[in-house]
Image (cartoon, helix red, strand yellow):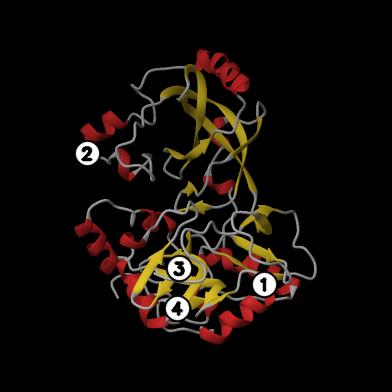
Amino acid sequence: MDLPVMPPVSPMLAKPAAALPPGWLYDPKWDGFRSIVFRDGHEVELGSRNEKLMTRYFPELVEAVRRELPLRCVVDGEIVLADPNGDRLDFEALGQRIHPADSRVRMLAESTPAAFVAFDLLALGDEDLTGLPFRQRRERLESVLPAHSAGSVHLSPLTDDAELAMRWFADFEGAGLDGVIGKDPEAVYQPGKRVLTKLKHTRTADCVVAGYRTHKSSDEAVGSLLLGLYAEDGRLAHVGVSSAFTMARRRELFTELAPLVTGFEGHPWDWAAQLVEGDRTPRKSEGSRWAAGKDLSFTPLRPERVVEVRYDYLEGDRFRHTAQFVRWRQDREPASCTYDQLELVQDFPLADVLGAPVTPRGH
């Protein structure tokens, strides 16, 4: 491979903002794997945010790049995956694509094909475009990639209308997107720098604390609080964790929560009992979505304390990301912590975001 911009390249990043900067350009924030694609003829590499290659995990995208992108180019974008109906993004299924077994990689490439959404052009032919303003890089990208592609490589929408961007912010969440990104039209490409802005959805919820995991560096410090919400059938569902505390606060929490420590018998998250009953397995319910075989042991607590947390959105019946601790809610009863308090997001067709469908599974 011999390109004017060679791998690895650390993608340009975004920092949180309370509002979109005026006079900038805006595009949707995709919920997938950030990737810089390098193509030199038949050679294709898929870079990642941490500069490691993901090429082997997405053979269907390698073929799509060969079919749909210029012969020699470097393109910044996002690897995404649609749900079985092609209606919204499915990050959990995308995470399952990272698998060590080649046979499973090939099987998943057919059963859960991914797509690539392009939003920046770093090189074309023998030209290094990273020193050009973003506005010009985007114009060059639009000249080589159709706005409404029927293939597996798509062009992300872009607007200079902040009002329209805020409509995208409200509507596109229903298709599984993550917010809106603001980009300075005159900025050059700055690898690894947080010079973009991101506007993400932030909401609060009152959750039951029904357990904790100890910190990796100390058995007498809380690593993360395990959060629960009551479902319609009265079951306390595990919806996620909250873990951003100072080490001093982690030790304080360990002491504060000690009176609530209980056994697994009768606890709503007694996985061993559920396995015996044949109800479900930890991996299918409250187990880790990110690391198969990870130690999922925790200290059970009597579900008597309520905490308010900030979250962005639900994926299925769980928080998509780690929730942020806001405050303890001594004024709330645990039984009042139900899914009913959460904001429901109206569905929005994924095809309407791009003007063309993202390939659904099985196709």
Sequence-wise first label, 1 or 3:
3
Tell me: 45 left or right of 203.
Answer: left
Label 1 belongs to which residue? 134
Q: Measuring 46% from the left and 43% from the top, which residue is drawn there?
A: 231
Identify the disc placed on residue 278: 2
Identify the disc placed on residue 234: none
> Which element carries disc 4, helix, strand or loop?
strand
Separation of residues labelled 4 and 3 (CA atoms): 11 Å
Q: Which quadrant holds the N terminus?
A: bottom left
Indicate the amino acid at tag 4: Arg
Label 4 belongs to which residue? 72
Identify the disc placed on residue 37: 3
Indicate the amino acid at tag 3: Val
Tell me: 93 left or right of 279.
Answer: right
| Front residue (pair 326, 330) | 326
Find residue 128 and report its image quarter. bottom right
Separation of residues labelled 4 and 1 (CA atoms): 20 Å
Sequence-wise first label, 4 or 1:
4
